[in-house]
Amino acid sequence: MVATVQRTRDWTVAVIRRKPAAVTAIGLLIFLGYLVSGPPTGRWDIPDRLSVIGTMLKGGGNLGDLGQDVVGFRRLWDCRDPYPVLGPALLEIGVAWDVRHPSTHPPSAFLLVGPISHLDPAAVGGIWATVGFGLLFLGLLAFRVPWLVSLGLALGLGALWGPVAAAFQQLTLVWLAAVSLAYRLRLRAPMLAGAAVGFASLTKFLPLVVLGYFIFQRRFRAVIGAALVGAAATACIWFVCPSAFARYLEVNRGNTWATAMRTDNASVLMQAHHLLGNLGVGLALLYVALILAVNRRALLAPQTAPRYSFFLYTFLAVFLLPICWGYSLAPLLPVVGYFLLEGRAGQIAVAAAAFLELAVVSPFGFAPLLASAVILVSILFLMRPPEERESAGDGRGASR
């Protein structure tokens, strides 16, 4: 069984390496599917994922959660309240969506859509979908995936993997691409790698967990890089609308907790709370402690297993999210890919199960199923780590 799993993995990789143009051709066929797709149905199966992304590409104005960032930046620019109740505020850009609470996104997230926020919503959707493909492509290139394969996967993953499909209407692909770039730069340019982590943290604060990888190697220039990005974003917001920070804290003092307590929140910690109350939270925290204890060497001395350690920190940034939707899991893609490509037989099987579960389950479906996929990924870090090979992401040996 072990040999079969490894042979299947090796055969698949060998075929892709021999025929990269075939991967590109499949990706282009899927892209054609976006262009000829009909209106979304809300099922979030593969045909509907084609429709969601296709509607954005064709200027259908299907912005999803991205609408709150567009509204947020417009109001930030005018120094109006950037955290209104979203339902009425979204009508300002022609989006009818009955949302009865303010945004939970930090003001820095609004900056990411700033250059396009004053365009027509149809144009915003088309541009952002195109940016999404570009972010996926760059993220794959950061791991030195051949460019033809990267192109095919970037075009196809939106239809094939639920978290990526949903992320086209969010900011999560920025997080995914930025952390991938940090991986590529982590040895040669730690300050730039830290800046990439800082850029990822403009979407949410949890990507900053990845800085632990650099801190425990005493590569403090990475912290400086992240701090510079954060300072630049803060300065921009302060210059345009100084009251935005106080308003964010005021609104989200209760809003964040209310959102976290929703039953459709796929956070492992909150799902444990829904299942067993405070006992569930305690057990979930014990499980986190177990992962940290098992991996204490990789966490505190990342140089001993540099690639494994980086993906561990990347995983923890997602696992610890108090508010987690299907699209929040998109940054797990390189983690799952790492174990599929370099893991031992058991890890390949678990990683494949997690990937397939997230490919089948709707990213806005039954939250416990999404949380169970995250738990599957966490099991990978309770198994014996893969052997460190020469890093494909930076051209240096794993011992460096």
Image: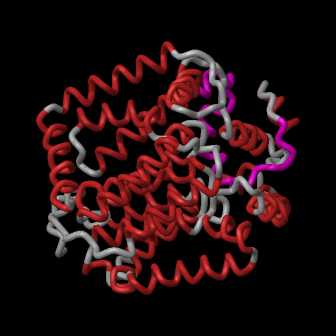
Q: Nearer the viewer, residue 91 or 349?
A: 349
* Residue closest to the far top: 36
Q: Is residue 48 left or right of residue 367?
A: left
Total marks placed: 0
Residue for point 27% across, 79% down: 303
Residue for point 33% across, 53% down: 337
Q: Nearer the viewer, residue 43 or 158?
A: 43
Picture quadrant where residue 250 is located: bottom right
Regarding residue 163, the answer to whether it shows in the image is yes
Q: Quadrant of the C terminus?
A: bottom left
The location of residue 120, given as percent across then percent down, is 68, 22
Q: Is residue 326 left or right of residue 377?
A: right
The location of residue 210, given as percent across then percent down, is 45, 68
Q: Quadrant of the N terminus?
A: bottom left
Residue 155 is one of the magenta-drawn residues: no
- Which stretch is magenta? 98-125
Rendered position, 208 above or below 241: below
Residue 105 is one of the magenta-drawn residues: yes
The location of residue 387, given as percent across then percent down, is 19, 71
Q: Is residue 205 left or right of residue 251?
A: left
Q: How is the image coloured?
A: secondary structure
